[in-house]
Image (cartoon, rainbow, N blue to C red):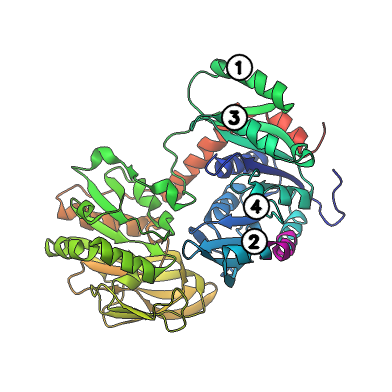
Amino acid sequence: MKKSTEIHARALMVQGTASHAGKSLITAGILRILRDMGLRVAPFKAQNMALNSFVTEEGGEMGRAQALQAMVAGVRPTCDMNPILLKPTDDSRTQVIIHGRVYRTMSALEYHSFKKEARRFVLESYTRLAGEFDVVVIEGAGSPAEINLRDNDIANMGVAEMVDCPVVLVGDIDRGGVFASIVGTLELLEQKERERIRGLIINKFRGDRRLLEDGIDYLERRTGVSVVGVIPYMKDLNLPEEDGVSVEGKEWNATSRREGINIHVIRLPRISNFTDFDPLKTEKDVTVRYIHSPVEVEGADLVVIPGSKNTIKDLLWFRERGFVEALGRFMEGNGMVAGICGGFQMLGRSIKDPLGVESEIGETMGLSFLDTETVLTDTKKTFQVMARIDGFYGMDCTVRGYEIHMGETTSMVKPFARIERRNSRRVDIEDGGVSADGNTWGTYIHGIFDNDRFRTEFLDILRRRKGLPQGKERSFLEDLERSIAMVSDTLRENLDMNRLLDIIWERT
């Protein structure tokens, strides 16, 4: 494979037989291993469809998975690492973000036609990265065998062909049918695409590898591609999930539910940035549970309304399900309710959408738990922020996070925090709101619980209410690093790295 004279980096693409095969973790682990070898490495995902996003230092929006991979690689996240981010607003339309900024909202058919044009944005970003790093590890999306999406593909083989790189294919054995999924994927590819696949990885294996040997021998004979690794199932990883499917019906630290702190997050249909709650899952006396129905409010110490990609439609769903009455009863019993971003907007008296930013519904009543009003605008605010929390239950601390919202909120209640910096600019802006009794509060700041001191002091409020011992401050970043180390160590032990390096440098 001949590289363009403008592109200096080597590249490896990690594709999967299906969504959730483990591409993101495999990509992250390979990045860390290569970084530890002294190479300058960067992640790249041409097109990512995700409602969990991150804001860069420049104020651009990118997929949170690629931001984590950049951290793993030891480099600053940039929007070139995820040039196209798709954020669905409903079942048929998606907000298209290019190079960190909103391009426009499109239907599925419109976007499919747009992909031919979008290729240039992908190549621009990749070329910039490839001129700066030694190796770019590229993550695919979904499966390369989606024959209905093959035309103008900018997610899988279209990218591999565009940058002329080899591919390793990952299959998830935990779901069953891994041999069929790998063979079937290869069968559905064109000959020139199959030739790009230079290695196979079987992921999430439980048991004795010797029981796999016959299957691996057959797979290699049948496909002509070698298996470069069998990766065991990794438990207890405190790493962000990519999309909302991953939190369906889940709860964390469930053994402590009776005696510990119970936090129930309402699983909105268009939930976004639910990674806000990942740090809470690392606290041993805290159970985080995602709930779908009002009866599940019972037993909570805190109920959270999270971010939403379509606040108005999710608010209507919220009302139809009967959550308003359930939360009213919960609050009468001294329960605490919090809202993050879209959830904060819902807590107010009304949400207005005069420009039709989210839907054809011009205005809807809020929950009226806070004396605030929100007007949606057509300009998205994306900032990294530093804020001061002064007075919320006696706290006095600085927090860092990020804002992603299309709306301005007018508040008649005490602010939750005061933003002192947006990106590199000093500001003095009130954020969020807190009810008079302190039991209802909201903020626009995503990542608020990533701040160790705030998280500990806030959870201590809930602990005191239940007569529990006060918590000990712990580092969320250290917990994150331990999980990253577990992934990279596991890959070192179970991947044929010599073979992988040969593939990257095309020595065979």
Marks 4,2: beta carbons within 8 A: yes
Residue placed at 41% from the left, 74% from the top? 419
Q: Residues within 10 Å of mark 2 (few under 14, many from 20)?
A: some
In which quadrant will I find the C terminus?
A: top right
Q: Nearer the viewer, residue 422 or 301?
A: 301
Q: In this figure, what is the number of numbered marks?
A: 4
165 vs 323, left or right, is right
Q: Residues within 10 Å of mark 1 (few under 14, many from 20)?
A: few
First reached walking from the N terminus: tag 1 or tag 3: 3
Q: Nearer the viewer, residue 318 or 437?
A: 318
Amino acid bearing label 4? Leu
The Cα–Cα distance between marks 1 and 3, rounded to whole angstroms, is 16 Å
Q: Which residues are magenta?
A: 114-123
- Residue 18 spot, x, y in % from top left: 57, 41
Residue 121 in magenta stretch? yes
Say if 316 sits above or below 167 in the image.
below
Is residue 244 at least partly visible in the picture? yes
Residue beneath label 4, please? 149
Residue beneath label 2, please? 112
The Cα–Cα distance between marks 1 and 4, rounded to whole angstroms, is 34 Å
- Residue 290 spot, x, y in % from top left: 32, 51
First reached walking from the N terminus: tag 1 or tag 4: 4
Amino acid bearing label 3? Ala
Residue beneath label 1, please? 213
Rendering quarter of residue 399: bottom left
Residue placed at 47% from the left, 83% from the top? 355
Q: Secondary structure at mark 4?
A: helix
Marks 1,3: beta carbons within 8 A: no
Q: Residues within 10 Å of mark 4 (few under 14, many from 20)?
A: few
Tell me the tag on residue 180.
Answer: 3
Rendering quarter of residue 171: top right
